[in-house]
Image (spheres, rainbow, N blue to C red):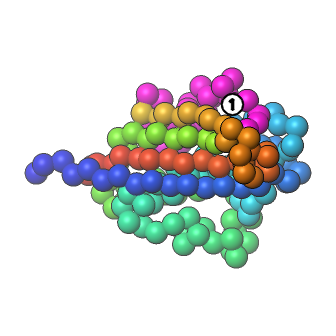
């Protein structure tokens, strides 16, 4: 049987304003503005990646699996949600080949945290860090992201039949 490949893309955005730590890729990133608002821990990078994985095997979106109306997911660890998504992808007969993620944030500066974020996501997904790409960019001062009202992330994944 020839290998079957599928792609998925995900995107997420959360506003600043929570009285908690800023988490990106499961890593606490120092930020004067505090953390991001959201029902779970609001880790936009992990949410975008989980969304891309769900999309790659046509399993819907994060809200379908972890609705914000369900108190079980209140302050949930996004890495735990990603583990559950990975289980769904594997149950569908697929495995992650690689992912490419971009965080859009005017601040804080993310370069010092990229290696830790890659390692965190690689461990969570049980793959080598070389399969995880994370880049950061700014919004060049434009719009809500440029005014530092929040952070967004996007992800693309490639999966193949196990």
Residue at (50%, 47%) from the top-left corner?
A: 155
Q: Is residue 31 left or right of residue 160?
A: right
* Residue 140 place in picture, x, y as percent: 68, 38
Asked whether, in this view, residue 26 is left or right of residue 7, the answer is right
Task: Tell me if residue 26 can be seen.
Answer: no
Q: Is residue 126 left or right of residue 79?
A: left
Q: Which residues are magenta?
A: 106-130
Reply yes or no: does residue 124 show up in magenta: yes
Q: Residue at x 46, y 69 (%)?
A: 60
- Report how many numbered discs are placed on residues in the image: 1
Q: Secondary structure at mark 1?
A: loop
Residue 133 image position (x, y, % from top left): 49, 33
Q: Is residue 55 above or below residue 43?
A: below
> Quick one: which residue is furthest to the top in this view?
112
User: Residue at the spot x=52%, y=41% of the render?
Assistant: 101
Question: Which residue in the structure is indicated by mark 1?
Answer: 110
Front one among 150 and 157: 150
| Residue lying at 42% horizontally and 67% vertically, measured from the top left | 59
Is-magenta flag for residue 10?
no
- Residue 117 lies, in percent from the top left, at 61, 33
83 sits to left or right of 40: left
Query: Which quarter of the figure has residue 92?
Result: bottom left
Q: Quadrant of residue 13?
A: bottom right
Residue in the foreground of this view, choosing between 65 and 158:
158
98 vs 86: above or below: above
- Work out which residue is located at the far bottom of the displayed protein and give it: 69
């Amino acid at each position: 049987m020839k290998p079957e490949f599928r792609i998925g893309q995900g995107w997420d955005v959360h506003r600043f304003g929570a009285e908690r730590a800023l988490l990106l890729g499961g890593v606490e990133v120092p930020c004067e503005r505090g953390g991001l608002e959201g029902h779970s821990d609001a880790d936009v990078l992990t949410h975008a990646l989980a969304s891309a994985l769900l999309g790659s095997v046509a399993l819907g979106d994060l809200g379908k699996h972890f609705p914000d109306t369900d108190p079980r997911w209140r302050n949930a660890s996004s890495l735990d949600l990603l583990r559950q998504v990975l289980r769904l992808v594997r149950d569908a007969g697929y495995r992650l080949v690689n992912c490419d993620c971009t965080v859009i944030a005017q601040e804080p500066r993310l370069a010092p945290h990229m290696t830790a974020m890659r390692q965190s996501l690689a461990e969570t997904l049980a793959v080598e860090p070389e399969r995880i790409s994370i880049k950061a960019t700014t919004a060049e001062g434009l719009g809500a992201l440029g005014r530092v009202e929040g952070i967004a992330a996007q992800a693309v994944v490639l999966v193949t039949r196990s």
